[in-house]
Every structure is written in C-alpha cells, then in structure tokens.
Image (cartoon, grey):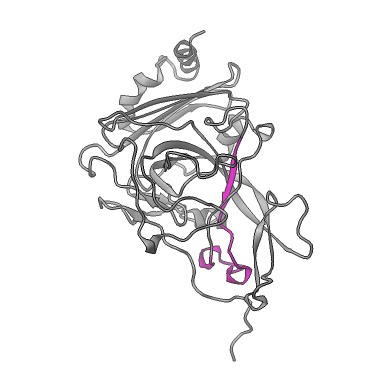
Amino acid sequence: MPRVARLSSVLAGVVVGAAVTLTAGAAAAKDGAFLVGDEEAGYLRMPLHRGGAVPLEFSVAVPSNGCSGDDEMVLEIAWSKQENYVHVHLQGEGILDPHPDFSRPESEWQFNPFLAETKDIEDGRYQFWIASAAGPPIVFYYAPDPEDPQVGPVLLGSQFDFEVPPEGAIPVALPTLQLFSSPMMQPDEDGNLDYDWVFDYDTAGRGDFPGEFSHHFVTFPGPELCGMNPFRLDLSHLRPYFSGPRPIEEAVDFGWYLRGGLLFDLTIEPGEYYDEAAPKTTTIGTYSGGTAIAGGIPEGWSMDIMAAFMGLAPPIKPWAGADQCLQTFDGFRDLGINFCAPPQP
C-alpha cells in the first residue's frame, strides 16, 4: 500500500472523520499543536520555534529571513506499529539558509573532547533530531589527574568509553536524553523546506547511517568531580557529553520514545562529518520544541533541562533570545567553586 494511503488509513483510525495526509495537515498546524492516538498508531503536529530546547553551550542561529515574516517550522509525525513505519514531515517557508555558514566568536567556543566538532561551519547542511526526555542513567568515571593530582578527580569518560571500568575510578550516574537523527537535508534556493523522512517503527536509528547506527545518549557531567555540587546540578561546573553512536542492534522502537516524552531539534551540521566513523552532532540549532512538557513549549520559552534533570518545577523558562533577531548562546556553566575544599573557618 502506498505510504500516503497508509497514512490516511492510520489517521482515519485515530481521528474521527479526519483521514488527512501529512502535507495536507501542515498548513493547519499554524492553529496550534495536537497529538492523537497511542503507541499503536497516532499523529502529531506542532510548530517548532527558535529556542524551544537549548542545552548547555548551545548556539541558536538567526533565520535566513532576518526574523521577518513567519518564523516557524511545522512538524508532523504519523506512525503505525502494525504497519511498521513512522513518517516525519517538516515544512517551513523561507526560514533556512541553503548550505548555511555559521561562525562562533572565540568567547563562545571551547573544544570539548566528549562532543568534538568544528568551531565554524562553511557550506553546511541540516539534520533533524528526535529525543526521549527519559533516557536511562549512565555511569561516568572520575580519577585524579595524573599530570596534576591537586586538581582532584577529572572525567575519564562514561560506561560506553571503556570495556572495563578504569581501576580505582569513582563512578557517578547521571540522567540522560536518548536521541536519533534523520538523514541530512537542505532547503531550496529560497530557504523553503518541505522534507519527508520515513523509517521503521521497530528500529528507530540514524537515518543517515541506516542499518548501522541507532541512537546516542546526551547529558552534562562535570569535567572535574569537585566542581559538581552534590545537591544542586544547576550550580555545578558542567559540559555536554554526547556518546558515540550505538550499534543498530541496540535500537529500540518508536514507542519507547513516545513513552519518554519527545524533544525535537533541527541542527546545522558541517558539509562533511567531523568523524564519519563515529558521527555525532554539533551544538548549533535552529528550530526546536517538544511534547515532553505538557502542553508543549510556548514560543519565547525554553525547556529548562537542569530543572527537568532535578525533578523541579517549572520545567520551562523564558528564552533569552526571544524577540531578538540575534545569534544566541547558552553560556559555559562554571562557577569556579571547589566543593571538595575544606570549609573555611
């Protein structure tokens, strides 16, 4: 059965009298977001905005229209477990630069060995990411720095970086997001994007490496253990950690992501992979949002990832770049506090 016909069949089962296709539904999404169905079959449509989900050390690019006009991306997803497919459709008019260039000032750049990427991008491309807000905890290992024992335990890596835990290392478990990505994409010469991505429901994995890689884990460990506040993650020295791609044999089905609550981001990627053998991502985004926050993330607001990790409310905060047509950056989180130091008299 053709995919459009299958999509209409799914929607007919979950929306009374509303057997529509992804493309037909996109224009109506301007009226708001909604989700119908369940893990077996369903349909989601929602607008994505700049700043909806901004992790630490993350830059948000300025749209190609200079923030004039309709600065919104429309996302639709339809799925059927029985027919084993998920259909993603992204649509935006004049809001993406074809083959984008992106430059970061020196003040917004520190090389990160656990999320290696280039500082600037020339002749780039785009990639869409789907994340579960309920990734499993993973273990990180810390040990004294052999070059400077006075520094205290430093981050060696996670459970995915070692076949055997380093001897004598201190294990620390942290919550994660789990995510996978689409193939690379480009808008047309006018900046319009009308993109479809279809993948198997039972094997959610990287669309640019089908049958090879599944998902990644992302979280925010401290580079030094003594810089992490044991009670307040938001008051700690943290940096992003992005695991290498997990093999396709570890892929979970799309229902697993639905149960965890979804987050979405459209990133700007270099024209060639930084490391094709172990592809990751950049920390440069455009349009984002998610269902992990009840009611969605309103325009001008951003998911507060630190609050979410600590189980605190509210889960959203005003986005610093709202109402500004500027490249924005969520800065480095380092308070310069040594929590291992003895208390002062």
Query: Is residue 232 on the magenta stretch?
Result: yes
Task: Locate residue 200, reporting x and y percent.
Answer: 58, 23
Report the side of 66 relative to 85 (left or right): left
Task: Locate residue 169, reporting x and y percent.
Answer: 74, 64
Identify which residue, 61 or 79, lies in the foreground.
Answer: 61
Task: Locate residue 4, reporting x and y percent.
Answer: 44, 13
The range drawn in magenta is 214-237
Identify which residue, 109 or 137, lies in the foreground.
Answer: 109
Report the side of 32 relative to 140 (left or right): left
Identify which residue, 309 or 151, lies in the foreground.
Answer: 151
With respect to residue 16, does 73 lie above or below?
Answer: below
Farthest residue in the top direction? 1
Task: Locate residue 341, reporting x and y percent.
Answer: 62, 81
Report the side of 48 relative to 264 (left or right): left
Instruction: Give the residue drawn at x 57%, y 54%.
Output: 114
Farthest residue in the bottom direction? 345
Query: Is residue 182 on the magenta stretch?
Result: no
Identify which residue, 70 or 250, lies in the foreground.
Answer: 250
Instruction: Give the residue drawn at x 27%, y 31%.
Output: 93
Q: Which quadrant of the figure has residue 318?
A: bottom left
